[in-house]
Image (cartoon, grey):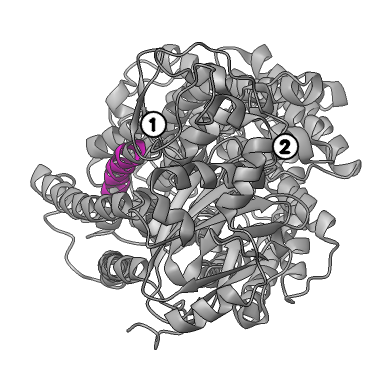
Amino acid sequence: MYNWIPFWPDTAAINADAVNSLFVAELGLAGLIMVTVVGMMLAFCVRYRRGSDASRAGLVTKTWHFEIAWTTATLGAFLMLFVWGAEMYVWLFQSPRGDEEVYVVGKQWMWKVEHPGGQREIDALHVPVGKTIRVVMAAEDVIHSFFVPAFRIKHDVVPGTLETIWFKATKTGTFRLECTQYCGVQHATMQGEVVVMDGADYGRWLTQQGVHESLAQQGEQLFRAHGCSGCHGENSTVHAPSLVGLYGTSVHLQDGSVRVADEAYIRDCILNPRSFTVAGYPPIMPNFSGQLGEDEVLKIISYIKSLGTKQESVR
Amino acid sequence: MSVTTAERAALPHPTAEPSFLTSENTVSSWLLTRDHKRIALLFFASITFFFFIGGIAATLMRLNLATPGGLLQPAVYNRMFTMHGVIMVWFFLIPSIPATFGNFFIPLMIGARDLAFPRVNLLSWYVFNLSGLVVLYSLIMGGADTGWTFYPPLSTDYATGYVLAAALAVFINGFSSIMTSLNFVVTIHRLRAPGMTWMRLPLFVWGIYAVSVVMLTATPVLAMDTFLLAVERFLGIGLFDVHHGGDPLLWQHMFWFYSHPAVYIMILPAMGVVSELIPTFARRPVFGYAGMVLALMSIAILSFFVWAHHMFVAGISIYAGVVFSLMTFFVAVPSAIKVFNWTVSLHKGKIAFDAPMLYALGFVLLFTLGGVTGLMLATLSVDVHVHGTYFVIAHFHYIMVGATVSAYFGALHYWWPKITGRMYPESWARFAAILTYVGFNFTFFPQFILGYLGMPRRSYTYIPDWQSWNMLSSAGASILAVAYTLPLFYLAWSLFWGRKAPPNPWRATGLEWTTTSPPPKHNFPRTPVVTLGPYSYDPERDTFVSQEGTNYAE
C-alpha cells in the first residue's frame, strides 16, 4: 500500500500492517507540526524583518488563552497517539498460542533456529505464510535483538531468560533478519533471512531436511541422560512434581507466589530450581546451571511441553 | 545606537581597571585562577579539544560508511563509535554550555562578582582534565568497544578493549559535573544582585539552574553505575551476570536513570541560550516568560520518570512499557510549549538576522524535527520497529547536535564580543551558520530513512541497497565538518584584527552588557541594582530598557 514511497520497507505481516497505519498517522501529525512552525517562522521573519514597516502596535507578550489552548491541543493529540501505540504494543508483545512454534538461539554472531520437528538452520528461518508463528528465543552469551523489518517486530534476547514474540506473514518471499543490539565485533554481520513459503512448499521443505528425531524426542533423551526422569518420571519414588500437563498451568510456589508455567518458567526451574520450589515439595532438585547449553534447555522444554498435549509433539 | 545626553551617563565608561584577560599575564595566573571568567575559558579550551577528537572519530565513521563494505577494520570501527559517543557526551555536550557560558555569564547576568565557590570551580576543571587524560589513555591504548552505553554482559565478560579505563574516565568526569552544578545552584540561590528576583532572572540563568538541579541529582547514580561495572568486570562479583545471579537489565535501568536525564542536561542550557538570542534579535520581549520558566522546570523534573523508554523492547514488563510511554508523552508537552513560545516571540518583532539569530532559528527548526520524531519513538509499537536502528541515531543527533551544538555556536557568537572585546566577522559567521544547517540536514535526515528501512545502528557494514542514503549522509558530514571548523579560523582571526567591541553591541537588556567588553576582573565597578525583568524591548518605539531600569533609544 505504501510501497511507492522510496523509503518504505517491505510490509509482509499483519503486525506490519498495523504499525504502518499508526506510523502514517504520526507522519501526518509531524508534518502538520512542522508546517505550522516553519510557516509561522517564515511568515514572521519576512513580515517583521528589521527593514519592514509593518505595524508593531499591540504587541502580545503573554496570554494564557493561547498557551492553554496550545497545550491542551498537543496533549490531546499526544494522548491519542499514546493509547493507539500502547494498545498495539500489548497486542504485539502478548504472544498468542501460535499455529506453529520455533525456537531461536542468538549467539555471537549467528541466529540458530530449531523447528519442533527437529529441523535446524543457521541465520535462516523458514515459515509458512498465513500462520501465526510463535518464536521462543534465548541468548547464549550477550544481549542480542531479533528484528525483522518487513514484519516490524523486534525483541531483545537477554541471557538468563526466554523471550517470546509472534508474527503472521501475509506474503511469501525472503525478508531480512537482523540483530539490532550491539553484540561484539561482528555484530554487523549477525544477519539472516526469513523465508516465507506457502503451506505446501513449507511441508516439502520440512521433509527434505533429513531429520529423524523431533525436538521433543531429542529433549526426552537429554531428560533421561541428565537424570531428570529419575525423579520426575512416572514410576519414580522421589517426591517430585509431575510434569505431565504442566505447560500453561498456574503453579503455586513455596514462597506464596504464583507463576504461569510458560517456557521462561520451565527454564528458570531447570537452571535455578531452589528459587522456584513448588509448594508442598522438598527443595531437593539439583541445579543444572552450567551443565546445559541454551539449545539443550530448549529441547528439554520442548519435551516437557509435549507431555502436556500429546498431539503437539507429533507435529 | 543613538543615546540621549541624560542616558549617556548611565553607559559604562571605559574604566582604568584592566580587563580580566589582561589583568595578570603569567601562566600561573591562568592555571591557578579563581576568576570564573578565566576558568570558563580554560573549560572552553578543554572541550574544544575534545570536540575535535570526537569529531575525528565521527569523520572516520562516516568515511567508513560511505561504502557498504567499509574501510576500517570492524574492531576499529566499533572502537570509533564507542569513543565518539563517550567523548561527545561526557567531554563535550554535558559540559559544553554550562561549564563555559554558564561559568562565564551566570555571575555577570545575576550581578555577582564570581561564583559562590571559586576554588571548587577551579578544582572542577582539574578533575575534568584528569578524566580527560584517562579517556585519552583508553583511546590511545586502543579504545573501548562496547558502545557508550556499556551494556553488560558484553561490557563485563566479552569486550576486549579498554572498557575499565573508559568507565573510570566517566566516573571521574561525573565529579566535575557535580562540582560545577553545585556551584551554580548555590550561586543562583545566594548571590543575586539586589532586585534580581527569581522571576526577573534571564531565561539562560533558569536553564542553567534547571540543568544544575538535574546534574546534581542524576550524576551520583552514574558514579554508582560505573563503580558497579568495575566491580563486576575487575573482581568478577555478579551484579549483572546471570551466571552469578545478576541481571543484565539492572544495568540498563541504572544507566538510563542517569542517562535519560543526561539528555536533558544537554538540551536545557541550549534552550536557555535560545531564549536569550531570540528576544534580543527580534527586539521584543519573549512570549510567555512564566510559561517558559515553568516548562524548563517541569522538563527537569519529568526527565527523571521516563528512563525505561530506552528499554521498550529489552524485556521489561509490558505494563511498565505503557507507563513509561505515557510519561514520555507528558515530557513532550513542555517542549512543545517552548517551541510555540519561541516562534510567537518573532511576532511583531524587528528581526535582525545576525549570526547568533541564524543559529537560534536553526535550533528551533532542528529541535522541532527532533521533537516530532521523538514522539514516534515514544509511541510504543512504532518504537518496536525503529528501536536500535539509525532512526534513533538521527533523532538524538537532531536534538543533541542539531539543537544543542547550534545553540552552543549561537552563544559563542553572541557572547564573543563580551568575552574577547572583539567583534567577529559577520559575513563569515552567517555563512558558517547557514552551512551548519545545510550540512546537518544532509548528514542526519537520510539516517531517518535508513533507520525506517531497518539499518541497525553500530554496524560497520550494510547491504548495498542502502549505499545512496549513506553516501548522502557522508557527503553532508563533510559539509558539516567544514561548518564546524570555520569558526575556529575566523574567531581566531578576530582576536587580533576584529573590530573592537562596544560594551553592548547587540543592544541587549541583561546585566552582562552593562559592564565593559571584556569585563574587568571583578565584573562590575559597583553592584548593580535590578528593577526590571529581562527582555524589555519595544519594537514599536525602538527603545529598550536594561534590567537596571535605564532607557535607551536605538
Please state which of the two labelled residues, at mark 1 or mark 2, is closer to the viewer.
2
Q: What's the chain of the residue with tag 2? A: B
Q: Earlier in the sequence, mark 1 or mark 2?
A: 2
Secondary structure beneath dot 1 equals: helix
- Check residue A240 for magenta coloring: no
Q: Quadrant of residue A17?
A: bottom left
**Magenta-highlighted residues:** B320-338
Expressed as whole percent of the image width and height from the top left, the position of residue B212 reads 49, 25
Q: Residue at x 78, y 62 (%)?
A: B60
Q: Which residue is mark 1?
A: B300
In the rendered image, the vertical position of residue B223 relative to residue A266, given as above or below: above
> Alpha-carbon distance for marks 1 and 2?
30 Å
Q: Nearer the viewer, residue B21 or B156?
A: B156
Q: Residue at x 29, y 67 (%)?
A: A18
The disc labelled 1 sits on which kind of residue?
Answer: Ala
Q: Nearer the viewer, residue B528 or A39?
A: A39
Q: Which residue is mark 2?
A: B155
